Image: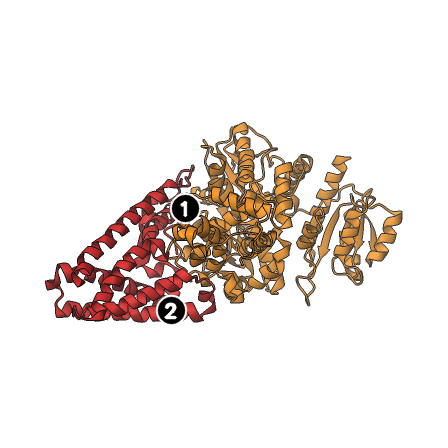
Chain colours: A red, B orange
Amino acid sequence: MIEVLQHQIQYIALAVMGITYISKIIWILKFKPMKERTPAKGSHSKAIIASFLCIAMPWTMESTTKKWYKWLEFAIFHIGIAIAITASFLIPEARNLMTPKVILIFKLFIAASFLILLIRSYRRIFIPVNRIISHPDDYFSLLLMLVWFFAAFFAMDLNEKSIFFASYFVLTALLIIYVPFSKMSHYILWPFSRYYFGKHFGHRGTYPKIS
Amino acid sequence: MFKEIKTTEKAQKATESFKKKMMRQTILSFGVCVHCGMCTESCHYYLATHDPKMSPAYKADRVRKLYKKYFDWTGRLLPKWVGGGDLHSDGDLQELMDIVYGSCTMCRRCSFNCPMGVDKALLIRTGRAILTEQGIAPQGIIDVSKDQWEVGNQMGVTDEDYLETIAWLNEELQAELDDPNASIPMDKMNCNIVYAVNPREIKYAPMSLLAAAKIFHVAKESWTMASKGWDNTNFGLFSGDNKLGAFMGNLVYDSVERLNGKMLVTSECGHGYRATAWESPNWTGRDLNFPIYNLLEIMTGYVKSGRIKLDKSLNQYKVTYHDPCNLGRSGGITEEPRFLLQRSVSDFREMYPNRADNFCCTGGGGAMSMSEYSKRRLETAIVKANQLKETGAEIVATACHNCVDGLTDLIKHYKLKMKVSLVGELVANALVYDKMYIAPEHKIEPLAQHQVLVIDDDPDVILFLTTLLEDNGYRTLSAESNETALKVLEDNKPDLITLDLIMPGKSGLTFYHTLRTNDKLKDIPVVIVSGVNPENPGQYDTRSFIYQHSLPRPEGYIEKPVNRELLLMTIEKIINLKVSKR
């Protein structure tokens, strides 16, 4: 059973994700883009690059400068996701790479991500300005990730008999399939939206910002 | 049992219209939001009220719900799961109007603070567009849009009034420069610049056009104004009506082509510049064969190339600069005004935050025409008021007529010791040119046949105004109350009325309503000469009043303490226009 979860189920989930990702991209491209008929005042390429890099440059936005801790949460949390997903492939395919040191680092990030999700859950449930913009999908995505990180943390012990080990693989497959249908699909939309943001404001010479 | 919800025709049409408006950028901005709330504190509506419903994400969600229901993959099956929803009733449409018009100026400050790249202003404008198509918008937006459609400019200025005003300004320019060759050219062919203005400059703020004309003259520029298609403003930007946007754009572009101008220059109007330079080419689908600049860019070029010289000692003021959203965030003009102010005022100081991070003047997105939301606008203006106060400046310079109105309103409301000026006016005042400017004594014109009725409850003001007018050749009548004024008007028909708004008994605005709705009196031009009620600064909001009652605008508006020159210029202009119409 564990074998099936680690291999077949994972690859089926990946295939579903691949198909839905491609479908989503085709769907996005079906919509006509708005085009500028004026000559550009600024540089498209500079602005597009800056628009992508803003994710790694919190000082370029007032929101991430003032709420630097939220940016830090974002960074750690997304590293945690990358680690937990990577681990789901390393464990069955390259377990020799899962040395005690690697496991320790993975566990640290996974635990930190779990804690960050708890903080985010608190905000979404108890802070009115966050609660008012939250829908069932926002709560469910949080819950799913919380359970997934929880299982992932214990699964890093590599004990195949543990309930957490099996749960981790089931949840990873579920997550991979659910992502394109949830708010987590921002993974697919983000590169496009940042591209057009940079292009639009770069065209008008307002981005990258002058300060 | 499920209760069947009936959808009204308007709501259904609005939804259908929404479905047709989806472009790639729009679906991305609708789809990518993760509800992280990072945008919340970038919005002055939220910062001033701390009302969760004022957060940009919430406001965008009111429009986004349609995307979620009709476009989102999951939302098409399970709309509630992802926040999808419909518009059912006319009440839903009104509620949406309150959000997209009444609680967002489309300043794009939140867009610049969104890690996901959501352009919320684009989403809000989409919301406005679907409502406009159903005839739903604040009355002021409807009135102004109608004027643009029917008359070709946002203040309904007739061709005759426009040309007469320019002719009058021409004389003023010659008098000010003491140069009979100075002029505001009209319909001159093959000029370097075709200059398009905001109708406010024709109707209420001629000083800014005069300043631009002075700068062009000193720079020896080859320029002209157009008799048709001269309004650079565009309410299509605010209402989401791309057809109006294209109509106004075409009017201005046609005038440049008709006159064979080399470039189009827009005056200091933030949204006018954005609409004319960036949006209208897209709305009209035209590939223009001439460039479009803002006056700020032209003036900067003059200074850099030595075509004009500035002496900052001529403006001994502490001056700060307010970046208009449509020039700063949406137009790419942030450094030019600073370059000019650093050279034309003795003490230039920055406002923080500034440039693309600046806060809206609170009058953007057409907010100055939406009297329904004036109270909320002024309440949220506390953010801007605090920002202004911290500069310690005496003058806040800006480059947008809308911002001038928005800032003036909030300065009055929060009792700040500050005035608003356009950058061009400060530059014109700092101009150094061969003939040293000496303020001309106002000419006494043979206006004795013209009579002005001064209505004010303060006898000292009546004495001051009647003396000033009589010294300048006018005959005067006066009344200390509106009731007395009505009696005076039974036996007299003055050529103009100056009206104080703060009066005991019937307010000046009620009296204004009486005047404008009385067949015998409605043609008498009115210049409001009024101050602010210190106990209730927003009490006499003329703009709100005229929009609420769909009244014609007063011919002039002068604030107390009265600037003698401005009052005389305004009255002279109005009477000259009246005479020429006879």
Taking the view exactly as shown, the residue that stands out farthest to the left is A96
Is B41 situated left or right of B519 in this image? left
**Residue sitting at x 46%, y 38%:** B282
Left or right: B383 in relation to B78: right
Nearest-to-viewer mark from 2 and 1? 2
Residue under circle 1?
A: B25
Q: Secondary structure at mark 1?
A: helix
Q: Please tell me how crowded label 1 is: few (under 14), some (14-19), or many (20+) other residues with Cα within 10 Å.
A: many
Where A54 falls versus B580 (above or below)?
A: below
- Locate residue B83, reporting x and y percent: 45, 57
Which numbered disc covers residue A121? 2
Query: Where, by quadrant of the figure, is residue A124 drawn?
Result: bottom left
Picture quadrant where residue A113 is located: bottom left
Q: Name the amino acid type tagged 1.
A: Gln
Q: Amino acid at mark 2?
A: Ser
Tell me the quarter of the picture where residue A110 sits. Answer: bottom left
Q: Is residue A152 visible?
A: yes
Which quadrant: the C terminus of chain B? Answer: top right
Between residues B565 and A186, which one lies in front from this camera angle? A186
Distance of label 2 from label 1 (alpha carbons):
30 Å
